[in-house]
Image (tube, helix red, strand yellow):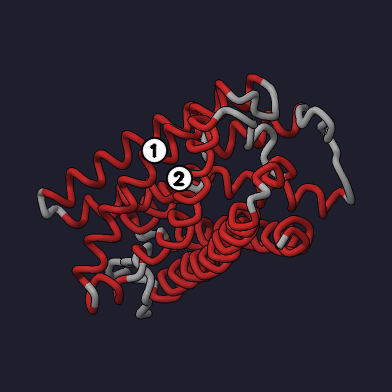
């Protein structure tokens, strides 16, 4: 099965159906993730951009507590940079995963990759600054988890860039995909939270006022510190290498399940958070 998605590069296998199923599962996941990420990116630009153009910076605080602090121009600038670059990151990141972009627009692919690496460095460091100096919502468990994520981002970005410079493109793509998974931890957190709220009909397992509780702690751990997205990606790589029928079908099933969860979460986030605020 041919595909236009870089996350997929199946090797010859004795079981064509298993390979096709695994390929289709990963293709479906990436298409839905890309649509959701672009929706989130445009929401960021519209919500924060409109407020900035109107000079109503305090409007940011409706979504990002302490996002704007009167008189703190340095901190406000860090927040603005973080938000702008986050939008660029979620819109531009998925483009890097399509081979057609690299094949037909190689110069664009290289420069977007360089910009992406630079952006994730800035976003991760700005995010750390905001978490530990601006009184971010949530408990210490969430703050520690997201700080661990920043370490993943920095290490994976360096490795992806290193292998690209050495023209070891197979290794580069693997680390770029790993980087993509950890970079989008905040997005996975939001989508996972909205799925939970939709399934339960409201907040369960956490206090919405303090934004803390066992569910949010576990969600932070498994999206930031021990990201399930990365674990599933590694399982996908392993299934490709082994090329056994059972493992391929099992991995495809796991990917399909998380794709459904992600899709429900994206719809919930779009209807409950993104569209009403723009």
The percent position of residue 158, horizontal first and vertical second, equals 26, 39
Q: Position of residue 177 (x, y in %)?
A: 36, 52
Above or below 230: residue 216: above
236 to the left or right of 255: left
Q: Is residue 20 above or below residue 189?
A: below
Residue identifier under label 2: 183
Residue at x 20%, y 70% (from the top left corner):
106
Residue under label 1, please give it. 153
Q: Nearer the viewer, residue 244 or 207?
A: 207
Dot placed on the residue nearer the N-terminal end, 2 or 1: 1
Q: Residue 12, how many percent across, how many down?
A: 28, 70
Q: Are marks 2 and 1 in contact (CB under 8 Å)?
A: yes
SS for dot 1: helix
Residue 230 sits above or below residue 126 on the image: below
Q: Residues within 10 Å of mark 2 (few under 14, many from 20)?
A: many
Q: Residue at x 82, y 54 (%)?
A: 198
Q: 270 or 238: which is nearer to us?
A: 270
Query: In the image, is 206 to the left or to the right of 19?
Result: right
Q: Is residue 84 left or right of residue 199?
A: left
- The residue at 71%/33% (across/down) is 216
Q: Under tag 2, what secondary structure? A: helix
Which quadrant, please, contains the C terminus? bottom right
């Amino acid at each position: 099965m041919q595909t236009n998605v870089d996350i997929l590069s199946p090797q010859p296998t004795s079981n064509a159906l298993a390979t096709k199923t695994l390929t289709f599962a990963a293709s479906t996941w990436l298409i839905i993730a890309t649509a959701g990420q672009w929706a989130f990116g445009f929401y960021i630009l519209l919500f924060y951009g409109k407020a900035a153009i109107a000079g109503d910076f305090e409007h940011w605080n409706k979504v990002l507590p302490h996002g704007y602090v009167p008189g703190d121009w340095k901190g406000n600038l860090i927040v603005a940079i973080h938000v702008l670059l986050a939008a660029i990151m979620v819109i531009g990141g998925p483009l890097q995963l399509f081979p057609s972009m690299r094949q037909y627009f190689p110069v664009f692919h290289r420069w977007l990759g360089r910009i992406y690496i630079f952006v994730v460095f800035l976003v991760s460091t700005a995010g750390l600054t905001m978490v530990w100096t601006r009184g971010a919502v949530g408990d210490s468990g969430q703050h520690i988890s997201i700080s661990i994520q920043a370490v993943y981002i920095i290490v994976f970005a360096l490795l992806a860039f290193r292998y690209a410079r050495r023209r070891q493109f197979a290794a580069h793509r693997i680390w770029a995909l790993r980087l993509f998974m950890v970079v989008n931890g905040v997005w996975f957190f939001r989508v996972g939270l909205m799925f939970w709220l939709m399934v339960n009909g409201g907040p369960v397992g956490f206090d919405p006022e303090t934004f803390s509780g066992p569910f949010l702690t576990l969600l932070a751990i498994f999206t930031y510190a021990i990201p399930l997205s990365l674990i599933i990606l590694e399982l996908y790589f392993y299934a490709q290498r082994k090329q056994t029928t059972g493992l391929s079908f099992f991995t495809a099933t796991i990917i399909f399940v998380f794709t459904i969860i992600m899709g429900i979460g994206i719809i919930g986030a779009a209807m409950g958070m993104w569209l009403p605020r723009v």
